[in-house]
Amino acid sequence: MSESSHSGNDLSEVKQLGMWASIASLSYIFWIVGGMELVERIAYYGVKASAGLYAKTPVSEGGLGISLSDYGVIIAIWAMMQTFIPVFTGGISDRVGYKETIFASTIIKIMGYLVMAMFPSFYGFLIGAILLAAGTGVFKPGIQGTLVLSTGRQNTSMAWGIFYQVVNIGGFLGPLVAVHMRQLSWDNVFYACAAIISFNFLFLLAYKEPGKEERLERNRKIKSGEIKQEALWRDALHELKKPVVIYYMLVFAGFWFLFNALFDVLPIHIAEWVDTSVIVTSLFGPEGTSNGFFQFWLGLDNTGTKVMPEGMLNLNAGMIMTTCFLVAALTAKYRITTAMLGGCLLSILAFVLIGATNAAWMIVLAIALFSFGEMMISPKKNEFMGNIAPEGKKAMYLGFVMLPQGIGWTLEGYFGPKLYEIYASKEIFSLQLLGERGMDAASVAAIPQGEAFSTLVAYTGEPAQELTTLLYNTHNIGMAWYIIAAIGTISAVGIFLYGKWLYRLQQS
């Protein structure tokens, strides 16, 4: 008998239905949870896509006006809370009920957005982020547990692919809402997100928990003593100690470092170093566009002459939203770990490209490469964990999916902005150049956080774009991205070895 049989984890892979047969086989409850995830992601990414820009925007312009190191502290705590909470709330969802935990999480998340809006300070944003993280950590296992119970092994690949596509419709719309709300005022972003997520209360009216009778019967047997059940934390710890889970956590942590750097740091990099007006000029001519349709859907500024950083990054969600089901159909033909390795390699290539150039269209290409990599790896992590989870522990295992993400994102949350600050901070380079150009040390030190470059432009009288080019060419800005790519490379080697080890387990 194989090790997988002894452990209660099913490592076998089941032949999938064809694309259209898979789509037709999905139940109404699958589409209900897809709708709830869509609404939650619009609100979540509305804040997440703009968080770094909000942090570094000076107080005089309505931002937090904090350093990237302080921003990194907020992101690291946010990451730790959001990704480690599901490890334990997943088990709670299995026992208490998915509908109840989804309802509670929505209330917590609304509170988080309102705190961010009402208290525009380091601690206000930190507390809001903690509430948002806690709400998301409670929300995820109930949604994903429902998805697992409402699908079968023969349509699981397509189900996770479509679900991930739905997630990215939210991921696409959220930043567009933020782009246009923040040009009015920053607090509008947070109020809008609180209003958007409230729509989930309507979805909950139509939600019926699959497998509820079995869960209630299991709980009854536990209470009567017919089934002995370990304490939740002990049960989770028992599953976590299995080699298939431990190795999974270790090898994928590096990928999640890579993944989250794109969302936490790249918008800042684009805002500081990439002349996105080149893209608008290529598409519409030197005058840009006043067409409201293009301004909204391409994430342009209100003058229609440049792409906002969130608009650039939105190519990621836009590609996944429109093509993820095709990539899911393609990767269904390969072993799960093989598809995930390919995705990791494409993502690494994207980061090398970001480090090598600040040409706007090359950044677009890098985001496109990363997006294909993400489509090959991210839906598969849930499919993989859902497949190997023992009966009655589906939501618990889908909570475990967050562990490597928790390790990778927490480390990136702290070190990603710090790496950027060391190798690529326009703020610090501008302060140094002001000193070199003759501004006295006391005046340099008195410049408010976030206003160094605008002070440099005013002090020297030189055009902003020329100064940006000068600073970019005299510093090794790509180094931050090369270091992140190197971390991803270590992860890719780990995924390759993990795939070979799993294959040997399946053959034994």
Image (spheres, grey):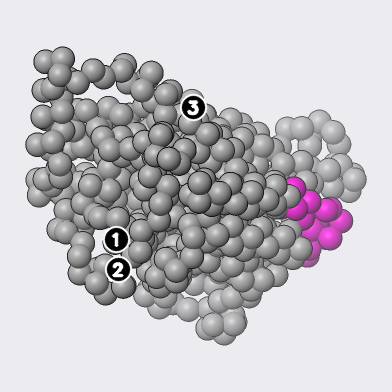
Secondary structure, mark 1, is loop
Q: Quadrant of residue 420?
A: top right
Q: Bin the neighbour count of mark 3 within 10 Å (Cα to Cα): few under 14, some 14-19, many 20 and up.
A: few
Residue assigned mark 1: 154
Residue 53 lies in the magenta-colored region: no
Picture disc at residue 17:
2
The answer to whether the residues at label 2 and label 3 have Cβ atoms under 8 Å apart is: no
Identify which residue is drawn at 37% across, 75% down: 293
- Toward the front, the furthest residue is 1
The answer to whether the residues at label 2 and label 1 have Cβ atoms under 8 Å apart is: yes
Secondary structure, mark 2, is loop
Residue 475 lies in the magenta-colored region: yes
The answer to whether the residues at label 3 and label 1 have Cβ atoms under 8 Å apart is: no
Residue assigned mark 3: 241
> Is residue 36 visible to the viewer in this orientation of the structure?
no
Q: In screen coordinates, is 331 left or right of 109?
A: right
Name which residue type carries label 2: Leu
Residue interval drawn in magenta: 466-484
Image position, residue 475 (x, y; %)? 84, 53
